[in-house]
Amino acid sequence: MFKKWAVIVSLVLTTLSPSAYGYQGGELLSPKAVHALGLNPNELTIIDFFAEWCVSCREELPEVEILSRQLMGRGVSIVGVDVDEDVEVGLAFQRELGLTFRVVADPEQVLVADFQPTGMPALYYVYQGKVLKVRYGAINNIRQVIIDEIRSLELAK
């Protein structure tokens, strides 16, 4: 429970402190992040930070799951980062939503500390280790928004 509140407080504080923003468009990910996420440099990867306690995540993830299936074999992959402090809670949440895309557990908040998302859910579009675009917070029609953004990046097959 403490870690959950620590993440929330961290998100609020980083939102209030402009100098504390994490990765922004145009920045290269740290080698540590690239390794932890197992990124394929030849694919556009959409990294989705989420947690069981995030209401917006619960609403958006089923759409992201559908999209991940549609994008298979098209040069785009989705990697989730589950920030739940209790890995079992995170796994149960993923099972409940039927998530099949790859998810990296981050119970110690290592990736959260590296990326410093200023809201949840948080999406990072990454290609060849470089952040191309970032989105924070709830997004209506997330599946269509992601499709449109992929097209605008012109990296999908």
Image: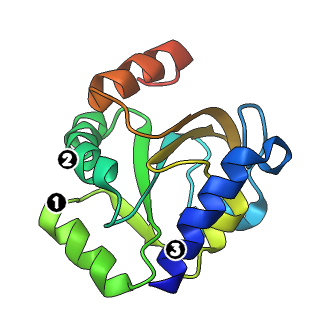
Q: Residues within 10 Å of mark 3 (few under 14, many from 20)?
A: few
Q: Estimate the spatial distance between the alpha carbons at disc 3 and disc 2, rounded to whole Å.
A: 25 Å
Q: Which residue is mark 3?
A: 5
Identify the amino acid type marked 3: Trp
Q: Residues within 10 Å of mark 2 (few under 14, many from 20)?
A: some
- Asked if the residue at tag 2 contacts the one at tag 3, i.e. Cβ–Cβ closer than 8 Å, the answer is no
Residue extending furthest toward the right: 19
Residue at x 61%, y 48% (from the top left corner): 118
Residue 5 location, x and y as percent?
52, 73
Q: Which residue is mark 2?
A: 62
Q: Is residue 4 above or below residue 152?
A: below
Q: Which mark is residue 97?
A: 1
Mark 1 or 2, nearer chain start: 2
Q: Of 24 and 28, which appears nearest the observer?
A: 24
The residue tagged with tag 2: helix, strand or loop?
Answer: helix
Residue 64 location, x and y as percent?
28, 42
Residue 11 location, x and y as percent?
61, 57
Q: Of 76 and 103, which appears nearest the observer?
A: 103
Using residue 20 as the reference point, say whether residue 106 is left or right of it. Answer: left
- Asked if the residue at tag 2 contacts the one at tag 1, i.e. Cβ–Cβ closer than 8 Å, the answer is yes
Identify the amino acid type marked 2: Pro
Residue at x 61%, y 65% (from the top left corner): 9
The residue tagged with tag 1: helix, strand or loop?
Answer: helix
Using residue 115 as the reference point, say whether residue 8 is left or right of it. Answer: left
